[in-house]
Image (cartoon, helix red, strand yellow):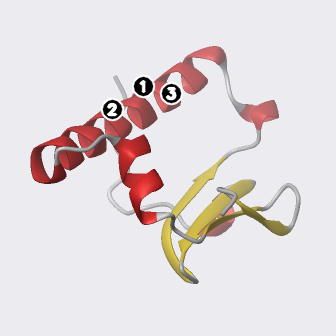
């Protein structure tokens, strides 16, 4: 198994990125190499990590507010958008 890099990678090393904004405030950004440069195992590991993060968030919402992700979104009705570098545009995540 390889060693992890000592320093975080520079953002210009990545080909694609997406940002998520809630009420005009960026709250999350993810970057990755283009699909052309990723192997099946790369995609599987990325999927595993994203699934784990999602499960942790849902568990926290359930513990704190006794609601899952969908219930929280329905109750709060956030103004959420995602910027996708592939499309160079912001897209609404939920219809109000």
10, above or below 26, in the image: above
Q: Secondary structure at mark 3?
A: helix
Query: x, y (%) of residue 27?
Result: 46, 71
Q: Residue at image x 61%, y 65%?
A: 19
Q: Which mark is residue 47?
A: 3
Query: x, y (%) of residue 32?
Result: 63, 47
Q: Secondary structure at mark 1?
A: helix
Query: x, y (%) of residue 14?
Result: 67, 56
Q: Are marks 3 and 2 in contact (CB under 8 Å)?
A: no
Residue 3 visible in this rendered orientation of the protein: no
Look at mark 1 in the image and give the residue it sits on.
48
Look at mark 2 in the image and give the residue it sits on.
52
Quarter-wise, where is residue 33 in the image?
top right
Q: Secondary structure at mark 2?
A: helix
42, above or below 53, in the image: above
Residue 89 visible in this rendered orientation of the protein: yes
Q: Are marks 1 and 3 in contact (CB under 8 Å)?
A: yes
Q: Are marks 1 and 2 in contact (CB under 8 Å)?
A: yes
* Front-lying residue, 95 or 1: 95
């Amino acid at each position: 198994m390889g060693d992890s890099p000592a320093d975080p990678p520079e953002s210009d090393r990545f080909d694609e990125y997406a940002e998520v904004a809630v009420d005009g405030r960026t709250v999350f950004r993810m970057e990755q190499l283009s699909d052309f440069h990723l192997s099946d195992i790369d995609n599987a590991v990325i999927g595993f990590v994203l699934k784990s993060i999602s499960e942790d968030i849902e568990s926290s919402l359930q513990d704190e507010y006794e609601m899952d992700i969908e219930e929280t979104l329905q109750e709060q009705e956030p103004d959420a958008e995602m910027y996708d570098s592939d499309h160079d545009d912001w897209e609404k995540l939920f219809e109000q």
